[in-house]
Image (spheres, rainbow, N blue to C red):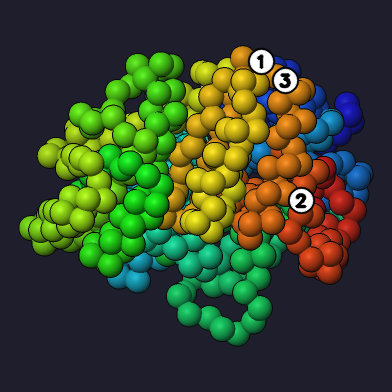
Amino acid sequence: MESDVLAFENFLGKEGVLKDDITLNTTDWTGQFKGPGSVVLFPKNTEQVSAILAYCSKNKLAVVPQGGNTGLVGASIPVHDEVVLSLSKINNSFSFDDTMGILKCDAGFILEDLDNKLASLGYMVPFDLGAKGSCQIGGNIATCAGGIRLIRYGSLHAHLLGLTVVLPDEHGTVLHLGSDIRKDNTSLHTPHLFLGSEGQLGVITSVTMTAVPRPKSVQSAMLAVTSFEKCCEVLKLAKSSLSEVLSSFEFLDEATMKCLKTNLDLHSVLGTPSAFCVLVETSGSNEDHDMAKMGAFLDECLSKELILDGVLAGSSADATKMWQLRESAPLAVSRDGYVYKHDVSLPLKNYYELTNVMRERCGDLAKSVVTYGHVGDGNTHLNITSEKHSEALENLLYPFLYEWVVAHGGSISAEHGIGQLKLPYSELGKQPEERLLVKKLKNIFDPNGILNPYKMI
Ligand SMILES: O=C(O)CC[C@@H](O)C(=O)O
Ligand SMILES: [Zn+2]
């Protein structure tokens, strides 16, 4: 490794190579994934990434590309002594076409910084995540990040136009995929292969994507609902009556509210306790119009007895309080004890059934069985906690939970990916021929298998 470090210092200068105290880059924020790693590299541009990958390819050194390291499945953490390649210093180039709404930028931009830059131009990034203050746009693409606005703007597949990627071959080949324009049907849509590829095909150094006009009016309301069936009725009504302005439809159950109160001292904004809370947001361009729509929607929810109670945010401080509840849910469960995290999608008819089934199955072994998530997309975050890691509980959970999800037509990973966490179950629900095709593709991009090994593929 010493000669490798010298070679890296030669490409990057001493300041681009971190040898000691690398724990920040070899541990994830939940503390669940820790790898020894060997060295952390901080290239400043695509050429330096190319030099690194060419060298690692010739010398068969495994590499873990790393963005903001905010993932939840251990995809950006080394398993053994892989070299960590951080993209965080590749964050200079930014350009924006404010007529077409097309953004081109380096992969290492922090999502929130990018969004702030776009704000001054009247636009925003078309997705939003709790991790926005630390995650990076290149990592968002590599993991096909979902988040709280997917119901309105669609997944990143709808926004990605082009990428610069570096391949892990002996030349460190630099590829410019797709284009910087909205419509280009001249080839296979190769940039999209990298969406959700978990850094296993190549290293993304630059991203071209669409941004969306920043809404001038945003309304948020929190609703108390007595049954999950009614939550689904409220969703249907929100889609039909809020239609084009609906931008979010999020969900927290009573156990989540309890966890927020006990572990973070965060209290519901609703006066009436209820089994379920729904957070609805609209985004539009005309406050009077959007307020009228939200008001009519809330009236209809009440008159049809779909909700027990509802609070409309009267100020941005009120809205912040509502969103703080939803966005703090992951932190609240992490303070509850050892957490078994799940990110699965299901047909809505089975969405909360999973929680009920698991609550009964886990019995007293679980401390809390908590569900929140993007109900509008059928994506549930079922988090099960125990005082400490429990093998008995783990054996009750797996593979039962993932098999149940697949048997009910769901996906074992809705938005967080496979990484290390779900690797043992990654074949579930997949046709063997599809897995084979994916492996063949991986082999074309990374014949030596050096890029982010022991993960999804
Ligand atoms: O903590 C989780 O399980 C989910 C994290 C994130 O995807 C969210 O939606 O808050
Ligand atoms: Zn989520």
Pointer 3 residue Cβ closer than 8 Å to ligand 1: no
Which mark is on residue 390? 3
Evaluate if marks 1 and 3 touch, with contact meaning CB atoms under 8 Å apart. yes
Q: Residue at x 52, y 50 (%)?
A: 351
Q: Secondary structure at mark 2?
A: loop
Q: CA distance from mark 1 to mark 3?
A: 6 Å
Q: Residue at x 68, y 49 (%)?
A: 404
Q: Is residue 182 toward the left or the right of residue 169 in the image?
A: left
Of the numbered discs 3 and 2, the one sitting upstream in the chain is 3
Among all residues in the image, which is located at the extreme left? 288
Q: Residue at x 41, y 47 (%)?
A: 228
Between 16 and 168, the one lying in front of the other is 168
Q: Where residue 305 sits in the image (x, y, percent)?
A: 22, 50
Q: Is residue 375 toward the left or the right of residue 108 in the image?
A: left
Q: Which residue is mark 2?
A: 426
Label 2 crowding class (10 Å Cα cut-off): few <14, some 14-19, many 20+?
Answer: many
Between 421 and 259, the one lying in front of the other is 259
Q: Where residue 302 sits in the image (x, y, percent)?
A: 18, 50
Q: Amino acid at mark 3?
A: Ser
Q: Which residue is mark 1?
A: 388
Q: Secondary structure at mark 3?
A: loop
